[in-house]
Image (tube, helix red, strand yellow):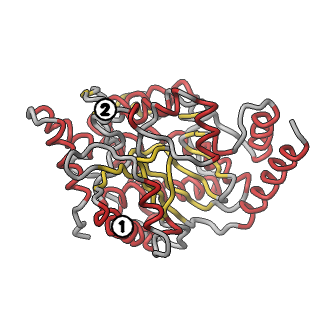
Amino acid sequence: MGEEQQLGYEEMLARSREAFDAVPDFTVAVEEEFALLDPETLGLVNRFEELQEASRGTDLEPHLVGELIASEIEIRTGRCESFADAAALLGERRQQLRALVEPKGVALGATGTHPWSPWQEQRIIDTPHYRRNDEILRYVVWRNNSFGQHVHVGINGADRAIRVCSALRNYLPELLALSSSSPFVENAFTGLHSARTQIFTRMFPRCGIPDALASWDEWDTYVRFLYETGSVTEHTQIWWSVRPHLAFPTVEIRICDAQPDLGESRSLAALCYALTARIARALDEGEPLLDLPHRLLEENFWRAIRYGLSGELIDFASGEPTAARARLEQLVEWVRPVAEELGAAEWLAIPDRNAAERQIARHDEAASLREIFEEQVRWHLRTPTS
């Protein structure tokens, strides 16, 4: 490894640790990924660069980025000091994005996968980052036509952020079950509630639920190992479903499918945010938290992929399966006091049916894929009542 590259990651790790030690607790930012669609056919269209150019000089420009393929676009709230600000910006960014794309004859989709557009027809955007990932991953990255929602939460203290990440591992299946929105891909009803997760986390290296780490030094050693062995060329090639972000001093939750409905997007982000804060408080106060081995978390992870909010998750305190919806309701009550303190409680909600359940119900009624997806695209245009 060259001296310049070595100095690069060593400096990055040092600066990241300093940033975590300085960041205030519980800042929040949310990222949403959307499919770019032909409004007539509802198929994916490779038009990101054109839309990015159209955003120049607008309020949306600094908050709009590319995400792997040219038929995908990402919007970001940016760092917010309160969840109320993030919730408002989620709506504002969606409105800004719609105002950008509709005059260009583009529609938006927000399910975790597209139901039928072939991955072979999607073009990877031409940036150094994605060219490198293309060269490294080949079929793995070509196949990943998926759309998600990420939530960043500021956690003060480098060691504390690592412990929060490790504790969050235990709840990733619950968050996935709640967010599941992708039962269809490649013209098939997969039988899964989150085909996105199966495609992404089961194919990419360094992905899915990570091992638990105890300290920043342990994280630092792992990142150094990856660079020194040539396993990664960029820190973002650690694609874990929860990770300490080395460019921003945040814990980033990456497990969730994209959300067609703005209200459900806000509720999901609120739960991610409040759960992260609740775990930090528990660690501060010495409250016992589960420390589950990867092999047990994998059981709930698969249940969330396969059955989503309609299935059961194992309650490891009792050793018994429990309805996923009941488990989510318990989780909401556990985080509610901290959510109320931080002004996020009003957005906490479990829907009667999440996006995957709505789509599967329509499939059971013999609706076509086109009809089902069109309903979710229209759902994206709804305005929440609260």
**Relative to 49, is 168 above or below?**
above
In the drawing, what numbered circle is on residue 249? none
Q: Residue at x 80, y 47 (%)?
A: 9
In the drawing, what numbered circle is on residue 185? 2
Q: Which residue is mark 1?
A: 100
The quadrant in which the N terminus is found is top right
Pick the front one: 36 or 310: 36
Q: Residues within 10 Å of mark 1 (few under 14, many from 20)?
A: some
Could you tell me if residue 318 is visible in this image?
no
Q: Are marks 2 and 1 in contact (CB under 8 Å)?
A: no
Three-letter amino acid code at the position of disc 1? Leu
- Give the x, y percent position of residue 27: 57, 67
In the picture as drawn, the residue positioned furthest to the right comes out as 3
| Distance from the alpha carbon under mark 2 to that under mark 1 | 27 Å
- Give the x, y percent position of residue 113: 35, 39
Please indicate whether residue 217 sits to the left or right of residue 58 in the image.
right
Q: Residue at x 61, y 46 (%)?
A: 243
Q: Residues within 10 Å of mark 2 (few under 14, many from 20)?
A: many
Pick the front one: 51 or 154: 51
Could you tell me if residue 320 is visible in this image?
yes
Please indicate whether residue 103 sits to the left or right of residue 215 in the image.
left
**Relative to 106, is 221 above or below?**
above
- Give the x, y percent position of residue 57: 49, 75
Name the image quarter holding residue 22.
bottom right
- Give the x, y percent position of residue 67: 50, 49
At numbered mark 2, what does the secondary structure look like: helix, strand or loop?
strand
Name the image quarter holding residue 75.
bottom left
Pick the front one: 104 or 62: 104
Three-letter amino acid code at the position of disc 2? Val
Foreground disc of the pair 2, 1? 1
Pick the front one: 172 or 45: 45
